[in-house]
Image: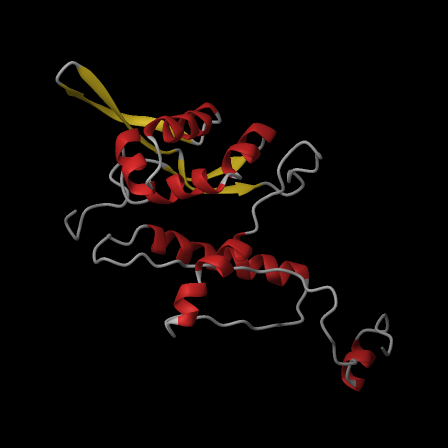
């Protein structure tokens, strides 16, 4: 792929909200999330995807169908090779997200994927090799400030998605923002207590 080629090489939406249990189940399988990751680079056929993940073509075809039926993948172009029409699949959007209040709560549905847990497993090799770049910071802030900060992070995620592909190494980029329910907190200062009478000494 040329260094200045658009990534991926087909048109797609920036975001897609997952609103059904079918979509939650479709995106929760590890192999299907790997397929989605590969399609960030370019559109691909089932044969190409099967070669990349080293799984039987029939297995990959099944998972591609599940994603397509859920509206998460779509055919973005076709090519006729001899008498066979090859279908190239692409993502429906660069990013999939759960709307607030729509996360799966049914016992019949798989748990929503924890991206930080996935990243922890994927980063073990880099950590062992001394090649892991990571930071963690904590800040006691209101929920609205957290939401605003997260909105400012989103363009960086999209920028990473669109980087031209080159080289031989795939890098993972993980961001997370989450409440910690048992993190120690300093007591309020005298000034804070004076400005907000609702604050009580802890």
Instruction: Name above or below for residue 82 compared with residue 102.
Output: above
- Tell me which corner region of the image, top left, top right, bottom left or bottom right, holds residue 12: top left
Provide residue 20's location: percent of width, then percent of height.
59, 29
Which residue is nearer to you in this view: 190 or 2? 2
Residue for point 28% across, 54% down: 163
Which residue is nearer to you in this view: 189 or 183? 183
- Tell me which corner region of the image, top left, top right, bottom left or bottom right, holds residue 159: bottom left
Instruction: Name above or below for residue 194 compared with residue 81.
Output: below
Residue for point 40% across, 29% down: 59
Instruction: Name above or below for residue 150 compared with residue 43.
Output: below
Instruction: Name above or below for residue 152 compared with residue 43.
Output: below
User: Outermost residue toward the left?
Assistant: 82
Residue for point 16% across, 53% down: 3
- Tell me which corner region of the image, top left, top right, bottom left or bottom right, holds residue 109: top right
Left or right: 114 as drawn, with respect to 195: left
Where does the C terminus fall, quadrant-wise?
A: bottom right
Residue for point 56% across, 35% down: 24
Provide residue 2's location: percent of width, then percent of height.
14, 49
Left or right: 187 as drawn, with respect to 38: right
Which residue is nearer to you in this view: 121 or 195? 121
């Amino acid at each position: 792929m040329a260094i200045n080629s658009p990534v991926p090489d087909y048109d797609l939406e920036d975001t897609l909200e997952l609103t059904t249990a079918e979509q939650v189940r479709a995106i929760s399988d590890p192999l299907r999330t790997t397929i989605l990751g590969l399609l960030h680079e370019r559109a691909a056929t089932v044969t190409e995807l099967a070669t990349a993940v080293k799984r039987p073509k029939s297995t990959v075809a099944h998972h591609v169908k599940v994603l397509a039926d859920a509206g998460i993948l779509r055919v973005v172009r076709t090519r006729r090779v001899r008498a066979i029409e090859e279908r190239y699949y692409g993502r429906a959007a660069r990013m999939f997200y759960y709307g607030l209040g729509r996360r799966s709560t049914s016992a019949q549905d798989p748990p929503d994927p924890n991206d930080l847990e996935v990243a922890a497993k994927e980063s073990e090799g880099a950590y062992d090799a001394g090649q892991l770049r990571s930071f963690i910071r904590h800040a006691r802030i209101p929920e609205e400030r957290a939401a605003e900060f997260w909105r400012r992070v989103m363009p960086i995620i999209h920028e990473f998605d669109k980087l031209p592909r080159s080289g031989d190494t795939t890098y993972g980029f993980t961001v997370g923002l989450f409440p910690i329910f048992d993190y120690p907190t300093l007591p309020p200062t005298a000034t804070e207590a004076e400005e907000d009478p609702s604050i009580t000494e802890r």
